Amino acid sequence: MKRNSRLSSTLHILVHMAEKPEQALTSEQLATFIHTNPVVVRRTIAGLRDAGIVTSSRGHGGGWLLGRAPEKISLAEISVALGETLLPFSTEPESPGCLVEQAVIAVLDDFRITAERLLAEKLSSITLADLTADFRRRFDLIGVSSHAV
Amino acid sequence: MKRNSRLSSTLHILVHMAEKPEQALTSEQLATFIHTNPVVVRRTIAGLRDAGIVTSSRGHGGGWLLGRAPEKISLAEISVALGETLLPFSTEPESPGCLVEQAVIAVLDDFRITAERLLAEKLSSITLADLTADFRRRFDLIGVSSHAV
DNA sequence: CTTCATGTAACTTAGTTAGTTACGATTGGC
DNA sequence: GCCAATCGTAACTAACTAAGTTACATGAAG
C-alpha cells in the first residue's frame, strides 16, 4: 500500500466486500486485494468498525462484513472514519503575538472551513453503491472481474 | 517551520514584504519571521520567483521584493508556485487489471477534479492585499505590530 | 482443546522534508 | 581591484511519519 492511498485502498476493500455481501472476508483476503498484510488492514479499517461501516468477528468463519447497505455508506463517512484530513495545510501558530501571522491564520482557517464543508458535501453524495455500480458496468463490458493477476 | 506549514509560512513572509514594498528583505530577515534559516526560505520561495510573484537580487542591498502589486497576487497562484497539493489522497493504480480498483480510481479522480476546481476558485478570490488589509485592521486595534517577541 | 480468526502493542524499515553546511556566483561600496 | 553582503544550490544530517512485520493475547466454532 503506497503512501496516501488509504482512502482508495479502503474503498477497494469495501467494494470487494459489497460484492460478497453474505461472505465474511478475512483480513488475509482483504490484504491480498491491496497488496499488503493483514495487520495493516486491521489497523487501517479499525475506525470503520467503530463507525459501524463494517463489522468484524473472530474465530472460525470470522472476518469482515459491511455494517449496512452500500447505499447507506457515503465516502464522507469513510473518509472521516479513516481519520483522513482533506486539506493538509497547517495553521498552527508559530509566532504567538505576531499580528501578521494572526491575519494569515484567520484567512486560511476561514478558507478551510468553507472548503471542508464543500468537500464534505461532495463526498456525502457519493455512496459505496455508486462505486459497485461503476464496477459492474466495467465488468459487464469486459467480462473478467479482477485479481487474475 | 513545522511540517505542512509551507503555505502559511510563505503568506506570513509575503505580508511582511507587502508592508515594506520599497525595501528588499534578505533571506536572513525573512527566516527570522518564520523561525527558520535562510536556506530554507530560499528553497521554499524559489518557486514564487519562477512564477514572478517575488523577485530576488544578489549582493549588497540585495534580497526579496514582491514581483507585482498585492492585489494581483492570489493565494491560488502562491499555492501552485509552492507546489502544494490541496487534495493529498493518491489514486495511483496498484493492481493494474483490477476492475474494482479502476472503478474506485475513476470515481475518486472525478471527485478530485471538481473539488480542485472549487478550491482553486476560492483561492483565486483571495489576494495578498486581503491579507495585508486584515493585518492592518488588527494593527489599528492593538497598536503593536509584530515580532517584538 | 485445537484451529482459525481478530485486536493490539512493539519494533523495524522506508520515505519525506526541514535543517545545516559549504561553496560558488553576483553585486555594490570603498 | 578587493572585500563584504547576498542569493543559488548541492550535499548531507536529523527528525518525523506511516507502512510493514513480529509476537502474542483473546475469542469463536467445531
Image (spheres, coloured by chain):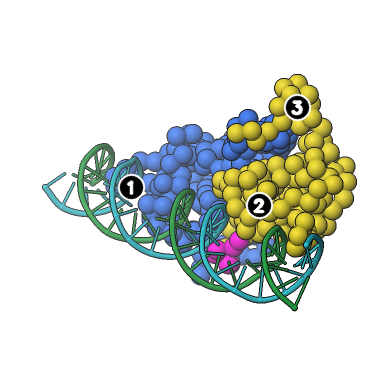
Chain colours: A blue, B yellow, C cyan, D green
Indicate whether residue A24 is drawn in magenta: no
Decide: is B86 above or below A103.
below
- Front label number (2 vs 1): 2
Q: Is residue B75 left or right of residue C15?
A: right
Q: Residue A145 placed where, x, y %?
A: 56, 62
Stretch in magenta: B92-97
Foreground residue among D16 and D27: D16
Quarter where residue B144 is shown:
top right
What residue occupies the far top of the structure in this picture?
B141
**How many numbered dots are placed on residues in this image?**
3
| Residue A56, visible in the rendered structure | yes
Residue B139: numbered disc: 3
Task: Return the x and y of residue A92 as percentages of the image width and height.
Answer: 59, 37
Say what amino acid the circle numbered 3 marks: Phe
Left or right: B56 in relation to A128? right
Chain identifier of the residue bearing label 1 in the image: A
